[in-house]
Amino acid sequence: MDFGSVAVVVSDGKKSAKWFKEKLGFEVRSQQGHWITVAPKGSDLVIHLCEGDTLEPGNTGFAFYVKDAMKEEAGLRKKGVKFTSPVKKESWGTTGAFADADGNEFWLIQE
């Protein structure tokens, strides 16, 4: 059994799908009623954009591994992506965090 999807609570599924497509270059995999999923091109894992109460937005626990976190941050900022924690190099690694349109946070981790 493989891990297939992860839910992220959003206020508007269609609006969120558009954000993931335009800002991160994700594909919209499914858009049938409440079941809206997005994913990076070529990925088997999808994010289910689950419409609901966003009174407690925050860290999703999702991490995206990248080759150059500083370069990735610069590219995302040019697209208007808000970073909640700028990319920073620590002794244990280089990481940063950004938020989607609903305030859900995602991590960048340099490989």
Image (cartoon, grey):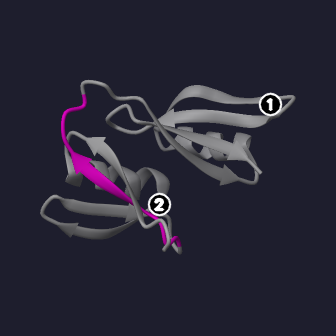
Query: Residue 41, how many percent across, how many down?
Result: 50, 71
> Above or below — where is 26 with respect to 81?
below
Which of the numbered marks, if any, corresponds to residue 3? none
User: Residue visible at 25% across and 50% down?
Assistant: 50
Which tag, 2 or 1, sits closer to the chain's start?
A: 2
- Which one is nearer the viewer's eye here, 80 or 62? 62
Residue at the right extreme of this rendering = 91
User: Residue visible at 43% across and 67% down?
Assistant: 4
Residue at the front extreme of this rendering = 1
Q: Is residue 53 magenta?
A: yes
Task: Inspect the image, locate mark 1, and give the three-letter code of the amino acid beneath it.
Answer: Lys
Would residue 35 be found to the left or right of residue 67 on screen? left
Residues in magenta, as a range: 43-54
Would residue 12 be found to the left or right of residue 47 on screen? left
Query: Residue 8, how many percent across, how many down?
Result: 34, 46
Asked if disc 2 and disc 1 are in contact, CB closer than 8 Å, the reply is no
> Above or below — where is 34 with respect to 41?
above
Query: Residue 22, how many percent across, how many down?
Result: 40, 55
In three-dimensional space, the C-alpha distance between marks 2 and 1, rounded to whole angstroms, equals: 25 Å
User: Residue visible at 32% across and 62% down?
Assistant: 37
Q: Is residue 77 magenta?
A: no
Residue at the left extreme of this rendering = 33
User: Residue visible at 41% across and 29% down?
Assistant: 58
Query: Residue 28, how many percent across, how many down?
Result: 34, 66
Classify mark 1: helix, strand or loop.
strand
Query: Which residue is tagged 2?
Result: 25
Tag nearer the camera, 2 or 1: 1
> Above or below — where is 93 with respect to 32?
above
Query: Which residue is tagged 1?
Result: 89
Task: Inspect the image, locate mark 2, and give the three-letter code of the amino acid beneath it.
Answer: Gly
To which quarter of the image does residue 90 belong? top right
